[in-house]
Image (cartoon, rainbow, N blue to C red):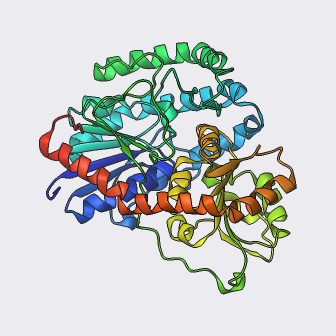
């Protein structure tokens, strides 16, 4: 039990990692732990509304006008959206590197504030889910855990495709070129950031890695049925969470205006992907003529998205309450949505935009749990045909249903809470 323990969660300033940590944090809180979230000021109040304490920080100087939650990344993605139409190897320079640069700038800016927070809160364990290292986590001198809520290709293996590429596991043709391009673009950035990390924490980063692995506890989020066969075994303090689905979302019932007949589709491109109004309106127009019923997660530009008569939608939706009730998911391929769809046994059509979404899209197609389509180039009948095929595929329904039953019987939130409790209690590396 964690009764009396103080657990600090420090997720990336985006809804995916934050929601993942909320699911685990709620389990720990019910078990008696004090749970504190370190969050950007733009998220102020959102975690308190779920019953957690908040410690606020900033990743850059305050803006002249107030921000909404995650506004920093919404603005960044909108400005770089043209990059989403390029091949992944070209996105390395136009999107991946600029994201790392922004994240590193944030890590440098916030380091002193994080030191203040950890000194004040005095956590028993720090749990972080971030893309780049924050030296203050290491310098705090407390046991800490890392969560990787991205595609596990970020845990590099020479016999697996490079992260962010979306390349097939059975075709090595372009792997070396992609890896060389990544290394050439990021070497100087890594060198500078590594020097900062050493100066602030005394601990160096591994070569071309922007994030530490914890010496205590590391967890990655991906179901066994989708995970990759590795040639290099992960260290014993790495643990797979097959899924990590929060139970804190409000209840949701199918609106009466959708009726009770026909395929029910859930469309969500995430809080960032849904900001592409042109793409969203193309999808809603196409699905509006499909004869299916559709639930649309409309996101931050909801005022500009047009819904047809066979649709309902809102800016924010309780995704984990909706997924059990739909028949199929159209997604950008974010790790949370992909793993949650598998948790509830829903086939997917994946329209990747950036980061690990290409890897998730490729993996869902490879294991047969979904269809990957080119996000901006697909033909109308490709998408509509994919819906029909997936819905009619009874062997797939049986296979993905069996996966869902296994995942639901072994909640990753409970598993993660057990591991974090053990770390809080023993203060030693948590191995299998």
| Residue 19, quarter of the rendered image | bottom left
For the residue pair 399 and 97, the one nearer the viewer reads as 399
Answer above or below: position of 159 versus 54. above
Q: Quadrant of residue 203?
A: top left
Vertical arrangement, residue 247 with respect to residue 143, above or below: below
Residue in the image at 36% along x and 29% along y: 234
Task: Please give left or right for residue 323 compared with residue 257 in the image.
Answer: left
Q: Quadrant of the N terminus?
A: bottom left
The reply to whether residue 215 is visible in this rendering is yes
> Does residue 64 show up?
no
Residue 269 spot, x, y in % from top left: 66, 54
Which is nearer the eye, 392 or 365? Answer: 392
Viewer-proximal residue, 349 or 395?
A: 395
Identified at 13% across, 46% down, the residue is: 425
Query: Horizontally, is 374 left or right of 362 in the view?
Result: right
Q: Position of residue 394 (x, y in %)?
A: 64, 64
Please give the name of the residue rendered at 82% of the width and 47% of the height, measured from the top-left corner: 378
Which of the image's four quarters has the C terminus? top left
Q: Which residue is at a point 26% across and 61% down the rendered structure image?
A: 29
Residue 283 lies left or right of residue 169; in this view the side is right
Q: Is residue 269 above or below residue 292?
A: above
x then y, percent, for residue 84: 73, 38
Q: How many marks?
A: 0
Residue 280 in percent (x, y) is at 76, 57
């Amino acid at each position: 039990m964690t009764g009396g323990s103080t657990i600090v969660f420090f997720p990336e300033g985006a809804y995916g990692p934050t929601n993942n940590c909320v699911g685990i944090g709620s389990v720990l809180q019910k078990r008696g732990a004090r749970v504190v979230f370190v969050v950007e000021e733009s998220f102020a109040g959102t975690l308190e509304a779920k019953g957690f304490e908040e410690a606020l920080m900033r990743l850059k100087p305050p803006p002249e006008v107030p921000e909404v939650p995650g506004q920093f990344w919404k603005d960044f993605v909108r400005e770089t959206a043209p990059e989403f139409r390029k091949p992944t190897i070209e996105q390395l320079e136009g999107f991946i590197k600029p994201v790392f640069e922004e994240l590193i700038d944030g890590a440098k800016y916030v380091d002193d504030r994080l030191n203040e927070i950890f000194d004040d809160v005095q956590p028993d364990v720090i749990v972080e889910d971030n893309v780049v290292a924050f030296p203050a986590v290491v310098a705090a001198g407390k046991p800490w855990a890392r969560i990787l809520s991205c595609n596990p290709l970020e845990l590099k293996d020479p016999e697996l495709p490079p992260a962010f590429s979306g390349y097939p596991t059975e075709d090595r043709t372009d792997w070396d070129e992609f890896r060389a391009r990544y290394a050439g673009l990021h070497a100087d950035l890594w060198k500078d950031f590594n020097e900062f990390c050493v100066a602030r924490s005394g601990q160096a980063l591994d070569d071309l890695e922007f994030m530490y692995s914890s010496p205590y506890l590391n967890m990655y989020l991906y179901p066994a049925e989708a995970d990759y066969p590795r040639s290099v075994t992960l260290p014993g303090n790495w643990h797979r969470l097959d899924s990590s689905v929060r139970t804190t979302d409000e209840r949701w019932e199918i609106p009466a205006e959708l009726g009770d007949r026909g395929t029910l589709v859930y469309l969500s491109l995430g809080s960032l992907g849904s900001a592409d109004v042109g793409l969203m309106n193309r999808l809603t127009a196409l699905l509006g003529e499909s004869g299916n019923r559709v639930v649309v997660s409309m996101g931050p530009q909801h005022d500009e998205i047009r819904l047809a008569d066979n649709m309902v939608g809102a800016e924010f939706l309780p995704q984990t309450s909706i997924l059990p009730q739909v028949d199929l998911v159209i997604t950008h391929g974010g790790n949370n949505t992909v793993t949650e769809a598998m948790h509830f046994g829903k086939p997917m059509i994946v329209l990747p935009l950036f980061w690990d979404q290409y890897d998730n899209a490729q993996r869902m197609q490879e294991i047969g749990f979904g269809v990957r389509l080119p996000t901006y180039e697909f033909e109308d009948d490709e998408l509509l045909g994919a819906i029909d095929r997936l819905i009619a595929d009874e062997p797939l329904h049986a296979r993905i249903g069996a996966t869902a039953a296994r995942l639901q019987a072994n909640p990753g939130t409970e598993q993660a809470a057990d591991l974090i409790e053990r770390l809080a209690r023993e203060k030693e590396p948590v191995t299998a």
